[in-house]
Amino acid sequence: MEITFTLNGKKKTLECAPTDSAWSLISETGDQEGRCHNGSCLRCAVLLGERPVLSCILPAYRLHHADVTTLEGISGKPLFRDILRAFDKVGISRCEDALPGLVMLAYQIISEKGTPSDLDIQSYSRYLVTRCAGRDEFERAVRLAGRLHGRKRSDRRPGAGSGAGSRTGATS
């Protein structure tokens, strides 16, 4: 069967078998390396639309006409850098296995909620199972990343660059 989808902003049309995983299509494009194939490591996490999913257990046909974003697709965005900065500050390991899943989940929460409340974060993190980061650390990091990112957005508003204490031109 032929599957057409958008991967990190680029349209792709690929052939797949009905039993193929989404990971098998994404990995053919060079955006993902080998994964666990059972959803246990979180390395295969991608955004399907705006929702984080584990691509190794997602049927490939679910990608048809979908927008897929990998870690590589968000790596140049300010929010990605804010998330990594918050993870470092809180002490979340940059574990190769869990980091993509943790980052994609944090990215989705902050993209959807802005500066998320504790309840917002907890409603997402209750599904989080990883040896690399505890739920409490993840929740603290998401709160911090949301504040960092929200502060930068407010700095870009018209008129925000005037007055004492402004951070005009602050980017990272």
Image (cartoon, rainbow, N blue to C red):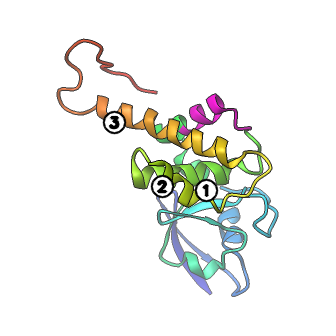
Q: Position of residue 56 (x, y in %)?
A: 72, 69
Residue 98, x across and y down, in percent: 73, 51
Sequence-first disc among 2 and 3: 2
Find the residue positioned furthest to the front.
119
Q: Secondary structure at mark 3?
A: helix
Q: For mark 1, what is the residue?
A: 125
The magenta region covers 83-93
Instruction: Name the residue located 66 percent from the left edge and 72 percent from the top edge.
Output: 22
Residue on which disc 2 sits: 120
Q: Quadrant of residue 70?
A: bottom right
Mark 1, secondary structure of its residue: helix
In the image, taking residue 150 as reference, residue 37 lies left or right, namely right
Task: Report x, y in % for residue 145.
Answer: 51, 38
Q: Is residue 40 magenta?
A: no
Amino acid at pointer 3? Arg
To which residue does mark 3 refer?
A: 153
Q: Is residue 77 visible?
A: no
**Distance in Å between CA atoms under marks 1 and 2:** 9 Å
Q: Amino acid at mark 2?
A: Asp
Earlier sequence position, callout 1 versus callout 2: 2
Q: Magenta residues: mostly which secondary structure?
A: helix
